[in-house]
Structure formats: C-alpha cells, structure tokens
Amino acid sequence: MSRARGAARTTFLSLRTRNFRLFFFGQLISQIGNWLTMIALTLLVLHATKSGVAVGGLVACQYGPILLLGAYGGLIADRSDKRVLLVITQTLQMAQSFTLATLAFMDHPPLMAFYITSLAGGIILAFDNPARRSFVSEIVPPAQMSNAVTLNTALMTSSRIFGPALAGVLVVTAGYAWTFMIDALSYVAAIGGYLLMRKGELFPVPKSVRAKGQVREGVRYVRTVRELYVPMVMVTIIGIFTFNFSVTLPLFVTHSLRGSDGTYTIVYAVLSVGSLAAALRAAHRLSPGVEHVVRGAFLFGAAMLLFSLTPNLLSAFPTALFVGFASIMFMTSATAIVQVRADPAMRGRVLALQAIVLIGTTPIGGPLLGWACDQFGARYGVAIGGVGAVAAGVWGRAECRRPLHADDPTGAVGSVVSA
C-alpha cells in the first residue's frame, strides 16, 4: 500500500504546484474541445469529398504554417512573456472556432472557407505551440520539470480519449456547428487558467536578446548536441510517415474495416486509452535517454504494422490500444529528453524545431499518405507508417553507436546507449 502511495506521489508530483494545476486542468478542457473540432472537421471534409487527398489537404492547411513559421514562433516564445503570449494565441484560436461554427450554421457554406479558416488556425498554432510547450518548464521547479512534461503528455492523450468520443456523439446528435461552438467555449478554461496564475510563483527564464541569426543559432545548437539531434531526426521521419493518424485512421476504419463515423471515433478513443497508459507509465521515469526513444520507435513501428493487418473491427480495438501505447512511449521520451537537455535560453527554439519536425512535416506526409490510401488502400497507408517508424529506430540505434571523434559536430554526451 505504501509503495502504491509512493508511486502515486511520484506520478502526480508536479500537480502539487498551484500554477501547474491551473495550467493542467485548463488545458485539459481546452484540448478536449480541440479534438472536437479536429474530428468534426475531418469528417465534414471526408463526407463532402470522399477523398483521402482532400483530407490530406486539410491537414496541410492545419499544420503547414508550423513548417514555415514554427522556428520564428519559437524565437518569439524565447523573447516574450509566454503567459501573455498564450492568452493572445488562445483568444485567437477561440475566434477561429467561432468562425468555423458560423460557417457550419450556413445552409451551403463553401468548402474552401473551411480550408482558409483552418489555415488561419495553423498560423496561430505556429506561435502557440512552442510557447505553450516551453512554458511548462516555467510553471514548476526544476526538480519537477521532467514529471510535468510527462503529465502534460498525459493531459494531451487524455483529451484524445474524451474528445473523439464526445465528437462522435455531438456530430451525430447536434451537428458540426454546435461541435465547433463547444470547442470555442472550451478556450475559456485555458485563458482563465493563465489569468489566474500567480506571477510571483513562476520560474521565468531570461528572455533572449534580439540579434540577427537567432533561428539559425537554434538549428546549429541542436546539431551540436547528440541527445537533441538524434531524437529530432527520428521525430522527423516518424512525423512524415507514421503520425498522420488524422489521414490514415478515418480511411482505414471507414473503408478497409467498413466502420461508421461513430466506430472511427471509438477506435480513436481506444487508441488514446493506450496513449494515456503509456504517459502515466513514463511519468515515473525522471531521466530519459536516447535509447528510450530508439526502443519507442521500434515498438511504434511494430504496433503500426500489426494494426495494418487487422482483419476486422473486433480485432482493431486491442491493436489500436497497442498503437496508442507505443506512440506515446516514443513521443514522451523524445519530448522529455529535449525539455531536460536543452539550454533554458534555447528551449523555446528547440521545442519549436521539434514541433516543426513532428507537426510541420504533416503537410508533407498527409497528402502523400492520402494518395497512397486512395490508390492502394488504407492498409498500405498504415503499413507505410510502421515501416517508417522501424526505419527511424534502425537509424537512431546506428547513430547512437557510431563512435565519437574529437571533431565530431554532435559532441560527447556521455553514455547515450544503455543497452
């Protein structure tokens, strides 16, 4: 019993901090709302076009701006009061959701308007994402940072459990417009959380001084630290080929497995249950290494390949659970090592680069995987993701075992590989 209580105290350590509690629960409500819009918008476009390429194009609008603007978003985060910046970006995201709701209330809204509004949301996200992720380290004491990062991942995955399931109910019973409207209202929780934080209890890092070449400086910094460089390249590969669930999953469930919209949201929720289990397990680990990232990539690849072989909906549920668990074991390790290893003055730019290679690569992989699903079947799209993750693991293990030389630009980082 005492061991269980000790494990619980370790797992939820950072929730003892008041400001982190405000952040955590405000973001939980807001992120559930986010998933309402993501699922509803995907289904709206899929029903209107019945095209994987069209869904991939929507994803490109949502995440393409991160590829182009993400590095500058990270620089702005390093230069700014992140709490103020986040209040601004979250307010703009609320306005975007209200716009989607207004369009959906119209009798015959032009599909292009949804794409344009999604593009605007993507531009906002390019500045919101690095600020929000790097702000976590300013809410808790340094000793709690790794735990806070993994709990933040648990937060995101919890929203993926409730969000898709709730979206499935709302789309069927209330329609697209009210689904978007509820998302807009959910931002009140996040904005309120930021405004209620006690500024004197934050742990701000020094702001970056304006100078030329600061974005390039961030890229060079990542390249000189192997514990940052190796996970970053692996996340790039997996971001392109594997993490395009918003494209491959609805096509796989509705076309290959002959499921419905409701089935798709249930499968997504089951996948997210596995993700939450992985995030809570990872919360016990206080010092992740690159080897954890490599193992996570192999596990993720195996799960995706197994999922691609699923013959029916009944067997899709346990394999989706495995996919969710494996995906977050990989991503939590990759995120935590970057948060812990990055220099505080560089953290915003480093996390922005990670967002670029994970989310910003979606516009590259999304349309390609959508085309592959249209041409060869959704099973092949899922299998491509599995092969991509395994390839990333193979490269990561080889790179970690490559001997370091005195002039090696990636620098010595101690014992990177533990096995």
Image (spheres, rainbow, N blue to C red):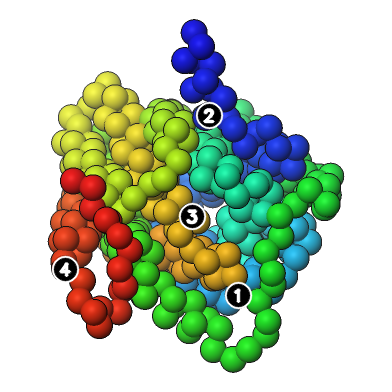
* Rendering coords of residue 51 (x, y %): 36, 55
Residues at marks 1 and 4, CA–CA distance in whole angstroms? 33 Å
Q: Residue furthest bottom?
A: 212
The residue singled out by tag 1 in the image is 75
Q: Are marks 2 and 3 in contact (CB under 8 Å)?
A: no
In the picture shown, does residue 361 fall above or below 109?
A: below
Q: Are marks 1 and 4 in contact (CB under 8 Å)?
A: no
* Rendering coords of residue 64 (x, y %): 48, 69
Amino acid beneath label 1: Leu
Examine the rendering and report whether any part of residue 4 can be seen.
yes
Q: Are marks 2 and 4 in contact (CB under 8 Å)?
A: no
Q: Earlier in the sequence, mark 2 or mark 3?
A: 2
* Rendering coords of residue 330 (x, y %): 34, 46
Q: Earlier in the sequence, mark 2 or mark 4?
A: 2
- Crowding at dot 2, Cα within 10 Å, few <14 / some 14-19 / many 20+, comes out as some
In the picture shown, does residue 33 fall above or below 409?
A: above
Q: Nearer the viewer, residue 193 or 101?
A: 193
Amino acid beneath label 4: Pro
In the picture shown, does residue 350 fall above or below 87?
A: below
The residue singled out by tag 3 in the image is 340
Residue in view at x 29 percent, y 24 percent: 318
Could you say whether the residue bearing mark 1 is in a helix, strand or loop? helix
* Rendering coords of residue 319 (x, y %): 27, 30
Amino acid beneath label 2: Thr
The residue singled out by tag 2 in the image is 10
Q: Nearer the viewer, residue 27 or 62?
A: 27
Count of marks overlaid on the render:
4
